[in-house]
Image (cartoon, grey):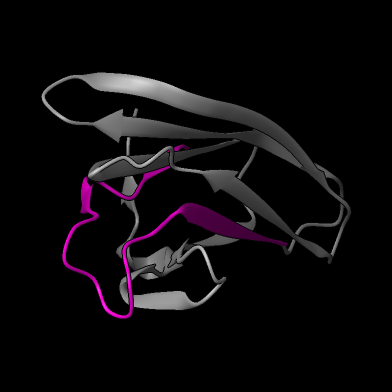
């Protein structure tokens, strides 16, 4: 079941705007969880910035971090191959500081088709 953050504004953040986005993937299944994380630039049109495949062993986790390319708005899609994963998305400044206003927890992600 795929998920999206929906649109995230990337202007006027404290301590700074996001330079990168980090996706945390936790696999709670008994097998390998695979899928793709896609990051889109939103600024009038939806443009793919990056597409990254992931593979997470059973009962393990991983991080995927991708540049936002100065995008003033962005969206993250997470497309796992099966149910059983938990995901969170975090905006990061150029100094690797988490931007609390850009935190999207698993329960806040929207399922898409």
Q: Nearer the viewer, residue 106 or 11?
A: 11
Provide the residue span drawn in magenta: 1-26
- In the picture provided, is 13 more to the left or to the right than 23? left
Quarter where residue 48 is shown = top left
Quarter where residue 85 is shown = bottom right
Measured as percent of width and height from the top left, residue 39 is found at: 45, 35
Q: Is residue 21 magenta?
A: yes
Is residue 19 positioned above or below 71 on the image?
below
Is residue 80 positioned above or below 31 on the image?
above
**What residue do we see at 50% from left, 77% from top?**
97
**What residue do we see at 62% from left, 51% from top?**
65
Measured as percent of width and height from the top left, residue 45 is found at: 17, 19
Extreme residue in the left direction? 44
**What residue do we see at 58% from left, 26% from top?**
51
Quadrant where the C terminus is found in the figure: top left
Measured as percent of width and height from the top left, residue 78 is found at: 50, 41
Measured as percent of width and height from the top left, residue 25 is found at: 65, 58
Marks counted in the figure total 0
Is residue 66 positioned above or below 35 on the image?
below
- In the picture provided, is 7 more to the left or to the right than 91? left
Q: Is residue 40 magenta?
A: no
**What residue do we see at 56% from left, 58% from top?**
22
């Amino acid at each position: 079941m795929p998920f999206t953050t929906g649109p995230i504004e990337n202007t006027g953040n404290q301590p700074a705007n996001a330079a990168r986005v980090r996706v945390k993937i936790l696999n709670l299944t008994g097998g390998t969880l695979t899928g793709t994380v896609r990051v889109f630039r939103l600024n009038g049109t939806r443009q793919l910035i990056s597409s990254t495949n992931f593979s997470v062993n059973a009962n393990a986790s991983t991080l995927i971090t991708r540049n936002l390319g100065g995008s003033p708005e962005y969206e993250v899609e997470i497309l796992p191959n099966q149910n059983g994963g938990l995901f969170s998305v975090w905006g990061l400044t150029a100094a690797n500081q988490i931007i609390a206003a850009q935190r999207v927890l698993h329960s806040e992600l929207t399922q898409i088709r």
